Image (tube, helix red, strand yellow):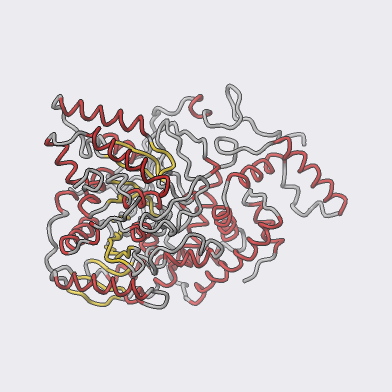
Amino acid sequence: MSLSQHEVKKVSLLARLLLTEEELTTMTGQISDIVGYVEQLNELDTTDVEPMAHAVEQFNVFAADEVAPSLSRDEALANAPKRDDECFRVPAVLGE
Amino acid sequence: MSLIHASAAQLLTQLESGEITSVELTKACLAQIDAADKEVGAFLKVMTDSALEQAESVDARRKKGEKLGRLAGIPVAIKDLLCTKGEVTTCASKMLENFVPPYDATVITKLKAADAVLIGKTNMDEFAMGGSTENSALGKTRNPWNLKCVPGGSSGGAAACLAASMAPLSIGTDTGGSIRQPASFCGVVGLKPTYGVVSRYGLIAFASSLDQIGPMARSAEDTAILLEAIAGYDAKDSTSANVKTPAYSQSVKQPLKGLRLGVVKEHFGEGLDSEVEASVREAINVYKSLGATVTDVSLPHSKYGIAVYYIIAPSEASSNLARFDGAHYGHRCDEAKMLEQLAKERAALEASGDEKLLGGLDTSLVRMYRQSRAEGFGPEVKRRIMLGTYTLSAGYYDAYYLKALKVRRLIRQDYDAAFKNVDLVIGPTAPTPSFEAGTKTDDPLAMYLGDLYTVTANLAGIGGISLPCGFSKSGMPIGIQLQGPPLAEERLLQAAHMYQTATDWHERRPELS
């Protein structure tokens, strides 16, 4: 299957990646190749096969609902590229 | 034998008897890193000061007669994707170049509790994506057996530091073969445990249902010692297996009487290098001479392993790596320039009447994420995020992701059927020995096929180990792989040790200047 550059551009928005024109061209070719390769799975009839999402199938693994120590605000903010005393700082979302 | 070439088992005995100190041993490893790592590039960071402090502290406590942990005084190298409190943990990415975790991964906590000396953080493919450690954004690692060749990946630094005698033990991670394949390329031992045996808490996730942390060493016995230290149930990881950890270091030397090995038919087909095949066949003969019975087994769906992996792993990666957005941590783009560019593009779109192209979704905040991630991630990471986003997107989910999960079940069923008749399966670890750097970087599919024999163990969640079993004519190591049913790590290690009592491939070391 071959993807169009336009489709790859749309995926790049969903993936939150900004690609250069050159990257879009390379990526369109490479992703088409890989998607073409994985299509060999269509040889198999999997109608009655239960999907296997995880290597160890566990259900309802709950933690006790108890307050436990957690990171302080300063520790949680310590790696932020931009912050003030209390918050992560990001570009304005409202009023664009 | 000199300190840097000795096994962890020998070193532990010498430390306990007082013949050597941890400071002497640590200094010997640091001196070897100093001498050889400019060429090899196994480490992203050498933790000289803290390693010496830990070594001094262990020596002092030993002198006082205090009870010490299982790895007391032994240097261990850490793949740079395990969160280590107060130490930069980069995942070999520009995105996390300055990330200092505020907590320790469970494996790090366990190593500290075992009184190991954390000697440094090893290089890897960025976010563990790759088969050659050529995708690291922070440095090149070379194969100590031939500096023109790759060390394998993604735990390339973890394997190379062992081959170059810079540390006796090291920790790697394996999502599709990332412990076993570099172990094979560098002539060392690497074990991917059954999923859930080692806690993943604090591992910077790539593909959560496949990732597993594991031990790497120069012998099966040392691998057993390290696995014993890091394995165990952890309530902080909901996928952790709630089973008792066997005394791997005790049982490893017990030979397996009547071992039944299954030779995986599908692992000897097209694409297998003839020298690799010859060495692996010879290793199987060694097992026969040790009393093992050998039969052929079939894993008919194994040929679909790479296709299934390259849907599931990128899908999970696209979700896991969404957290790297330049807001909470990670690289942030220059916002003023970014906003200026965005305004220009919007104006151009408006002028061309094509302003609805991206549905107005490319807001300032989204653009900040997109620009930051574009600058922070390397090509392989971007490729996998894109591929995963595509296969999970509306309209394609059933055709790709769901289909892959179903074939994953078939792969697991093949193993379950095989293990009804044999104790372990055996075959090559990788289709070829290590290759020269740069020869596969433009062809992702060719690189991906290097994981053909390892990836199915991750999909099925079972354990596998790679052992050195020979050399190519050009002097590069070749590895054999054993895989076992779930939780059969004891058996894998015993079978590996058995082989190493009859052969000396694992004792050979490269000549480094």
User: Is residue A37 shown left or right of residue B280?
Assistant: right
Give the x, y percent position of residue B173.
38, 51
Front in this rendered view, residue B447 or A84: B447
User: Is residue B152 shown left or right of residue B28?
Assistant: right
Q: Which residue is depicted at the point 28% across and 36% down?
A: B26
Question: In the rendered image of this protein, does residue A38 appear above or below residue B178?
Answer: below
Question: In the rendered image of this protein, does residue B84 appear above or below residue B450?
Answer: above
Front in this rendered view, residue B224 or B19: B19
Q: Residue farthest to the front?
A: B513
Q: Which residue is depicted at the point 44% across and 71% down?
A: B304
Front in this rendered view, residue B141 or B118: B141
Q: Quadrant of residue A11?
A: bottom right
The number of callouts visible is 0
Give the x, y percent position of residue B307.
48, 67
Give the x, y percent position of residue B137.
53, 47
Q: Residue farthest to the top?
A: A85
Q: Which residue is depicted at the point 52% across and 35% down?
A: B98
Give the x, y percent position of residue B473.
34, 70
Q: Residue farthest to the right?
A: B351
